[in-house]
Amino acid sequence: MNWMKKQKLIGYLFILPSLIGVTIFFLFPLLFSFVLSFTNWTGPSGQGTEFVGLQNFQRLVGDSVFHQAFGNNFLYLLHVPISVIFGFIVAVFLNRSVYLKNLLRAVFFLPYLISPIAIGFVWMLLFNPTEGPINVLLMNLGIDNPPGWLASSGSSMYAIIVMSAWQIMGFNIIIYLAALQDVPRELEEAAKMDGAKRWQITKNVIFPFVSPITLFLLIIGIANAFKNFGLIQAVTGGGPANSTNILPLYVYQTAFRYYELGYASTIAIVLFIVIFAITLLQWFGQKKWVHY
Amino acid sequence: MKQNKQINVYKTIMTAVLLAAGFIMIIPFFWMLSTSFKSPNEIFEYPIQWIPSEFDWDPHKRVWFGDLSFFNYYFNSIKIAVLGTAGATFIGAMAAYGFARIPFKGRDFLFLLYLMMMMVPPQVLFVPKFIMFDWTGIYNTHWALILPTIFTIIGVFYMRQFFITIPNEISESAFMDGAGHFRIFFKIFLPLAKPAIATFAILDFSWNWNNYEDALVFLVSEELYTVPLGLDNFVLEFSVDYSGMMAAATASVVPIIIIFLLGQRYIIEGVASSAVKG
């Protein structure tokens, strides 16, 4: 019995290294960041830092760049449903009889693993407004005034949306493919017996069946759209005229370009709350959507 | 017989359609590679010259032997990714075993805490980590990147899910024979979990390799730059050297493409299972 007890205590030993690290590098910084959001901390040493109460939050309300970044972030979300819809279509086709299934799966998945910034620079040249292949192609198709893409504030976010959709689609395909394996054959067969066409089966049998996965992919995509800024920082730096600035990028720039660490923490906390709300949405949504 | 043939026609058409779509997916990679071998006046030629009329190796020479050499970036990235991944795999596997197999007090609460930490956007942690690293002197050293990644949360989560699927009888019979948790972990679980551990290690390595944001925040000295940061720096310095940019981009993606070609099945199945079961 004593030995059994000891073995239970050993459980702590197993998680202890991880727990110490998680406390130092995740838990403590998280709490620290809440504290910082109520201060006017500037520069690394933070000399002369004072608690300023809700001042940072008040400043946020009137900060036009923050408003713009918030709005941009929602526009940026567009790449999520686009990549989910295309991901579903490709997965359904891949799941039917095709040759070279593994090769195709790999080809669609590859962009997901590649460094966003490396591929961002490739897209940056492809989207070059005057000479880039995309606009040259558009001009040859008879579009005389193709968009300036990354160079113009009206179209820059759409170029970013294309890049991001392209990059995360492979993930969606892989997840859908795994989910499609679980669609009961009998269900499809029964629909076929009733004379349903392929696309009808897809629409009325398969799509509802994988709806929890669709929700999962939408939520995870949306949450990530509030977390990643590397691609945008590298390709546009948030410009032109803040047209591609999104919340996580604004946090980074406020903190490490202007060294307003207190105010940056305030923006970060708002970001955290947004992601937290989205995740809660998933938890409750899943309970409603899952139907087996 | 007849029906069989019909199916094959359909199958061929479907394959062709998907191949065309797949080709569009990887066009940017072809374009990157082909541009990296072009001389400046050929880059934007229309129609696109997929195979340059003459292979120009100069862009690659500029990347590897120029003022900002990628050799140094490679060395830094490999060091960080190898140490980070090795640490994360080991510490993550241990914690995963603890969470999966030892019913100690407060376990569920701690696990919930881990789950919540997964939601925290990295940007929330940048500022406090910057201040802490500045205090402790690991700011602008590779440790600023290695240490946090060793204490992986997603790795604990992923490997725990695998450990849970190992039948209870296996560890129980070892327990009866007087083996403690450490023996069971090293002698039974680690060998059994090789595929899951390999999958996590491959994924973690590629995350570390691609990690641009942390390097951007925590590294300032050029000699410490990692590959993504070096690439970024190259583009800033030589913003009109398009073929050089593409050579640099090629240099930064090649290791991941090689890893993907070698470990493709592990990676794809790992990603699929971690997300669907999670």
Image (tube, coloured by chain):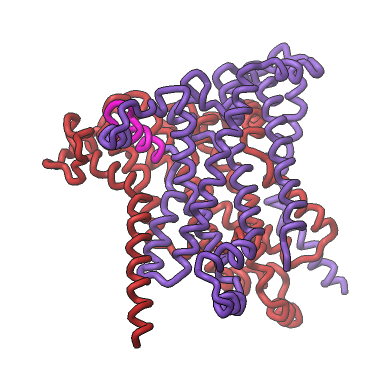
> Does A272 lie within the magenta span?
no
Quarter of image, res B252: top left
The residue at the point 50 percent across, 41 percent down is B211
Query: On the rendered structure, is B253 left or right of A253?
Result: left
Image quadrant occupied by the C terminus of chain A: bottom right
Q: Is residue A115 above or below residue B101?
A: above
The residue at the point 55 percent across, 39 percent down is A78
- Picture colour for chain A: purple
Q: Residue furthest top?
A: A48
Determine if residue B94 is in view.
Answer: no
Q: Is residue B170 above or below residue A261?
A: below
Q: Position of residue B97 (x, y in %)?
A: 68, 64
- Picture colour for chain B: red
Query: On the rendered structure, is A271 left or right of A152?
Result: right
From the image, give the main secondary structure of the stretch colored magenta. helix
In this view of the protein, which residue sits in the foreground, A134 or B278?
A134
The residue at the point 42 percent across, 22 percent down is A152
Query: On the rendered structure, is B179 left or right of A120?
Result: right
Image quadrant occupied by the N terminus of chain A: bottom right
Q: Residue furthest bottom?
A: B1
Q: Look at the image and give the residue range highlighted in magenta.
A: A118-133
Q: Is residue B176 above or below residue A69?
A: below
In this view of the protein, which residue sits in the foreground, B74 or B62?
B62
Q: Residue furthest right?
A: A1
Quarter of image, res B100: bottom right
Quarter of image, res B228: top left
The residue at the point 46 percent across, 70 percent down is A96
> Does A127 lie within the magenta span?
yes
Q: Position of residue B120 (x, y in %)?
A: 68, 40
